[in-house]
Amino acid sequence: MSIGEKGNMLIGAIVAGGTGRRMGTAVPKQFLKLGDRIVLLRSVDAFLACDEIDTIVIGVPKEWVTYTKQLLDEAGYGGKRRRIRVTEGGVNRNETMWKMSEYAVEKLHAEEDAIMITHDAVRPFVTPEIIRRTCKMLLASDDKTAVTAAIPATDTILRVNENKEVLEAPKRINMMQAQTPQTVYLGRWRKAYKKMTVAEREMRSDISGMYISAGYHVKVVDGDRTNMKITTPEDYEIAQRRVEAEKERAKESESNV
């Protein structure tokens, strides 16, 4: 099944509402330079490469809305810039997603069967292939299903209590590490969000936990180990080294032509 075959509106929802407290940087991590490209723009690039996506909505902190629009204007997107919208995010991930869903309904006139492809801006190595994979799985499922990219856990995962005591060591073969995109039907996600208490919205930032608690289903598609999330200074250093290595390989390829 190809994306868009059923005629659903496809909305890329890039969550860029973080303030970067854990990074300890002067600017939020989504606005840091990664090689010669801003982190956020690398995620936008991947979504723009999916021509099937109708509109990309980016949720950013209120004080960064104007800067983000200017950044996009200067990013070299040409006519594709019209496909990108910026809206004010919220105090946490779920609230930012809610505000993007509100934008989709009010400004894009999206209906309940629209597909919202949610993605963390600070996963700048996402590929169009992974984005399309989540959409295809969702289109083959019912409207109570969410789809998340994920990779097999390579380490043993421990479940602990507040005293750091191990309660369970589940079999690693059954463990996977969630990534984004996480893709949903817009109307169903909004219904699930409204069912949650304020405390639940703060605790269940991952769509998988949110859907399971609401009695809905979640399916997994293959992510990629390179689809890393930049959370700490160490992550940022790893990402920089990867970009530098890719640049060197490209130079070598050009010199061998």
Image: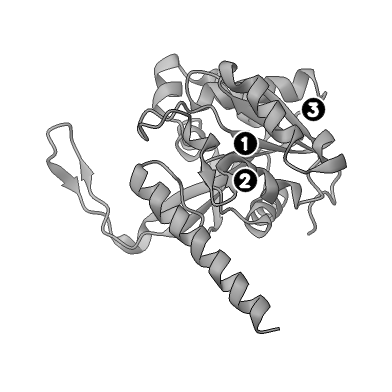
Viewport quadrant of the N terminus: bottom right
Is 211 situated left or right of 106 in this image? left
The single residue placed furthest to the front in the displayed view is 255
Residue at point 59% right, 40% down? 40
Rendered view: 52 above or below 64: below
Image coordinates for residue 172, horizontal then vertical, percent:
31, 61
Whether residue 221 is visible here, answered yes or no, is yes
Which mark lies nearer to you, 3 or 1? 1
Residue situated in front as seen by the camera: 216 or 255:
255
| Disc 3 target residue | 110
**Residue at which label 2 appears:** 43
Q: Secondary structure at mark 2?
A: helix
Residue 201: % across, % down: 46, 22
Q: Of tags 3 and 2, which is closer to the observer?
A: 2
Tell me the residue at 44%/59% (across/down).
241
Judge by depth and name the residue closer to the eye, 253 or 189. Answer: 253
Residue 225 visible to the viewer: no
Residue 204 location, quadrant: top left
Tag 3's secondary structure? loop
Task: Tell me, for residue 14, which label it has, or none.
Answer: 1
Find residue 224 and report its horizontal and vertical position in percent. Answer: 51, 61
Q: How many marks?
A: 3
Q: Farthest residue in the bottom direction?
A: 256
Neighbourhood count class around disc 3 (C-alpha, 10 Å): few under 14, some 14–19, many 20 upward:
many
Please state which of the two labelled residues, at mark 2 or mark 1, is closer to the viewer.
Answer: 2
The residue under label 1 is which amino acid type? Ile
Q: CA distance from mark 3 to mark 1?
A: 17 Å
> Residue visible at 47% across and 23% down?
92
Q: Are marks 2 and 1 in contact (CB under 8 Å)?
A: yes
Task: Say which label, 3 or 1, has the lower sequence index.
Answer: 1
